[in-house]
Amino acid sequence: MEFNNRHSFFKDQNDHAFTALEKAHFISFAPYAFQASVLLRDFDILKKLYKSEKGLSFAELMQDLNISHYGLRVLVEAGIGIGLIQISDEVYTITKTGVMFINDPMVRVNTNFMRDICYEGSSKLKESILNGKPEGLPYLGEWNTIYEGLSKLNPQQKTSWFEFDNYYSDLVFPIIMPYLFSYQPKHILDIGCNTGKFSIECLKYNAEVNMHLIDLPGQIKIVKKILEDQNISTRYELIEHNILDQSLDIPGKYDIIWMSQFLDCFSDDEIIGILKKCKLALNPNGKIIINETFWDQQKFHAAMYSLQMTSLYFTTMANGNSQMYDSRVFIKLIEEAGLKLIKEEHQIATTHSLLTLSL
């Protein structure tokens, strides 16, 4: 495909053989590169170098660190190879990549998510692909899918999961409010409401809209407390519902059905089934509006790469059968569900796409 040729990190047709070999070697040691990078961050080694204008000697770097001489040495030397640290005349300094690794908020969110949610289970990628199940999930808990266990994750895991999940969509919500309310909706259904941030944004933006939030029972308990603590409105309804249960209809009729980074949590067939359920819950002139991140619609390689790697989280940890989609695959699923795509807009807040569907 043209997209892959244009954006591929591994441009073997243009790379010299030695450069290509270097990249291959980097991949072969990637697990240790990740672990060492996280420790260089979490032990504040990179932070100390960042704060030093002229760099630090090894002895200066050792001061106030709660690790051994040997431990610091192997981590710093690994950091040089990874590209986070450089050394000249026995003085260590942080590289631009190191600065980005500790300071960029998106990098931090992604790194914590990989460390706390994905890393251990990633070793079960082969089994997950062969069995069609998230075989890495038992590292977190004995659930069929991660969504059943979100409320039961330990505090650090929970923070990392929700920060990863919310970071991207939170940027979109304020931007799309004028478009959303140009349809003058009175009743909006928020499917997969998560922590309720989208519904809260709507309630604050419009004084007349009524929000209806659907999710699994464990998540509804969480969002109930969040909404009560906000104390901003009583114009909402909480609905416990398993969207995959085809024997259950979505209660009510709605002007807008909203799904934000929700459908990527399901397989092709499940997406078609969910959309068909939504059709039955939509008012005649209503709209289904979907917020997603499609890897083929990304402007930058890093964004494409991050989404493709996130697909492997779905494979090993989430449910074993979903992914971050290619928009062309996703749009075909919309058509199979019998819905019309009436508008699509891409690169909202850099990475997001908004699809508007009608009956």
Image (tube, grey):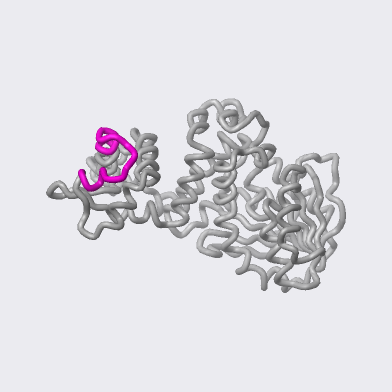
Q: Position of residue 283 (x, y in %)?
A: 84, 61
Residue 315 location, quadrant: top right
Is residue 265 at all visible to an observer of this figure?
yes
Q: Is residue 313 above or below residue 53?
A: above
Q: Is residue 66 magenta?
A: yes
**Residue drawn at (21%, 51%), measured in percent from left and top?**
56
Q: Is residue 323 above or below residue 169?
A: above
Q: Position of residue 124 (x, y in %)?
A: 52, 28
Q: Is residue 219 left or right of residue 78?
A: right
Q: Which residue is at the front of the view, 328 or 234?
A: 234
Q: Position of residue 54 (x, y in %)?
A: 20, 58
Q: Is residue 298 left or right of residue 13?
A: right
Magenta-colored span: 59-74
Q: Which residue is at the front of the view, 232 or 287?
A: 232
Residue 246 location, quadrant: top right
- Image quadrant where one finds the C terminus: bottom right
**Residue drawn at (56%, 59%), measured in percent from left and top?**
352
Q: Is residue 83 magenta?
A: no
Q: Which residue is at the front of the view, 199 or 294?
A: 199
Q: Position of residue 134 (x, y in %)?
A: 60, 32
Q: Main secondary structure of the magenta part?
A: helix
